[in-house]
Amino acid sequence: MLVQTLVNGISLGSTYALTALGFALIYRTLGIFHFAHGSVYALSAHIAYSLITRWQLPLILSLIFTIMAGALVGILINFVIYEPMKKQNSSRQVFMIASIGTSIVIQNLIASIWGAITKVLVVPDSETYLYKIYAVGPAFVTAAQLLVILVTVIALIAIAVFSRSSVGLSIIALGNDAAVAENLGMNVKKIRYITLAVGSALAALSALLVSLDLRAVDSAMGVPILLMTIITVIVGGAGSFSAVIAGGYLVGLIKNFGIWAITAEWDNTLLFIVLVLVIMYKPQGLFGRRISKLGR
Amino acid sequence: MCKRFQSVITMTLVFLVIMVVAGCGYSAEVYKIGGIFPMTGSVAASGVYLRDGAQLAIDKYNAAGGINGHKLELVVEDSKGVPRDGIMAYKKLVDVDEVIAVLPTLSSVVMALVPEINAGEVVMINTLAKTNDLVGAGPRIFSITVPTSRDGVAQARFAFEKLGARTAVMLYLKADTGVSYDKFICGEFERLGGKILSRDGHDAATADYRAVLTKIKQLNPDVIFIESLYQETASIVKQARELGITAQTVSYSTVLSGQFREIAGEAANGHIISVSGFDPEDPMESVQEFVKTYKAKYNETPIIDAAMAYDAVCMIAEAIKIGGYSADGIANGLMQFPGFEGATGIIPKFDKDHIVDRPISIQYFKDGEWLLYDE
């Protein structure tokens, strides 16, 4: 049971880490509590459903197009909602409300295009290997779960490399101090667009992986993942990307190991207790370090 | 000038009084039936099926000339699956649309409406909520679905007596129906002499059950009772088999939906259900007629939600023919209604608790179809 729970926790934690990393990137760089992140996740899952089930594209193409679609959605949100508000020097609270509104609009858009009914993700015959089950010692794991873990690791390595590029360093710099970044001649508007694109692309990737594992998408799937994302970012620490990643795996493991001691209906309660304790005693997160200022 | 002004005021007041008086009482031109369905939210899929099923019945009666020359009209309000919004939807239907018959769904919404129905001049037919608290809940409250006290007991007895199960675990949806099933199934199973090893609740739209299933695997029960919505049940069954759990899975008939098979995949084989609702494969003529008509209009196979709403509208229509178009008239008509063959099969007469005592059968899934369990 220990090995099985560990495997389950790592698989679940991978999706939390990916999604939360995208959320934290947007929050840290732009200072926006991006409530629409959950809806972007759900929208990306539906786009993946259309690519895989309706148009029967090979998995690798669906992966690429889904990530691109997620990035594009992020860019659109910035273009339509956030940049105009930035020009008007809107407050953080107004940004948050706009984000909530955007989330509702996207959720209803999903329902009107794809319907509110749960859609079953049916992969092409060439991809049915995803549902094979493997024994890992005493534990069982599906190929889809292994894919989740593998792709997450690759994505995190890619993000780590990206963060050392000039664009990545610009994003970090903007997050540290927007005024200084602007004075240094950085194109902060372009960096904001890239941040929304990368953050949303991570949500899209996570959505596709989860949908492949669970074989279903529905219009409300963005809500629970948003909750877990916020918990992950707070528990891990918003100031550091490695802290957020660690937080994602920790939350995944808590959800799985917590059920050993208590019944399943209390797993979220346990997480909230951890969340409250972190906020009270380590507000910078379990793995984060104190940050003096968040830039815009 | 003053006299002229006074006469204008007087005429205006008379006009307003006439309008108010004329507005009182029912609009006899159209007989309205209110649907309080979750059109948005996490169970919006159900709302769509309910609306479409109800509308199909409305269309059938209107195509035949209506009831006593009056057309039927379905007025749908969104409960969002939440009691508070369900009450608001009800008040709008009653106060603005002047409906006197409503079809709500979801146990939490239905139970929230019970005091309103009992205090008002409205009749209610519950379509899907299985909570046992609806039994004998009021003189104008009816239910065409078998409550959990009967369905759950049937499941427990079947598992103990026919499957020989002596240990079980319960996975239930944390809503009125799931909680009610948990109570009656576990109560009956233990009364018979079995042992419930664990009871775990989950929220709707939960996707990953591997954590609780890993714990269940350790417990090694004979049977796993899954009392949840079809998507959640399918996910549990699928993930249980992926983890190597071989215990028999049993649930209620919410899974009689094509999507259960597609989500659960091969794991669906062998799953057992108690059926007291709708089976699209039922060869009964009335069932197949409904399935055919539904497919022709909506281009998909109906699920239990649509069938129940269809039958509920038919029963209200027939009750109006018997008792007249008033809340008490419809209630009396429903009690006198002898039953019929509807979209959900044979619907008997309402019993003294205003419940239709449908027969419960046990079925299992094998190679793409549901078969009657005959040992």
Image: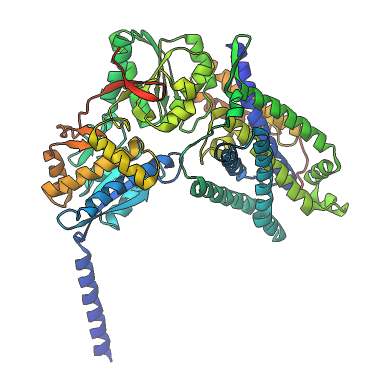
Residue A285 visible here:
no
Q: Compared to A130, does B115 lie above or below? A: below
**Residue at 19% from the left image edge and 56% from the top image edge:** B65
> Could you tell me which quadrant the N terminus of chain B lies in?
bottom left
Q: Compared to B317, does B138 lie above or below? A: above
Q: How is the image coloured?
A: rainbow
**Residue at 57% from the left image edge and 41% from the top image edge:** A50
Q: Position of residue B164 (x, y in %)?
A: 33, 7
Q: Compared to A144, does A101 lie above or below? A: below
- All told, the count of numbered labels is 0
Q: Position of residue A145 (x, y in %)?
A: 62, 23
Q: Quadrant of residue A274?
A: top right
Q: Residue furthest right?
A: A184
Q: Is residue B46 left or right of residue B101?
A: right
Q: Position of residue A179 (x, y in %)?
A: 82, 52
Residue B354 visible here:
yes
**Residue at 43% from the left image edge and 26% from the top image edge:** B233
Q: Nearer the viewer, residue A236 or B217?
A: B217
Q: Is residue B34 left or right of residue A26?
A: left
Q: Is residue B299 left or right of residue B23?
A: right
Q: Position of residue B255 (x, y in %)?
A: 39, 28
**Residue at 47% from the left image edge and 29% from the top image edge:** B262
Q: Residue furthest front?
A: A125
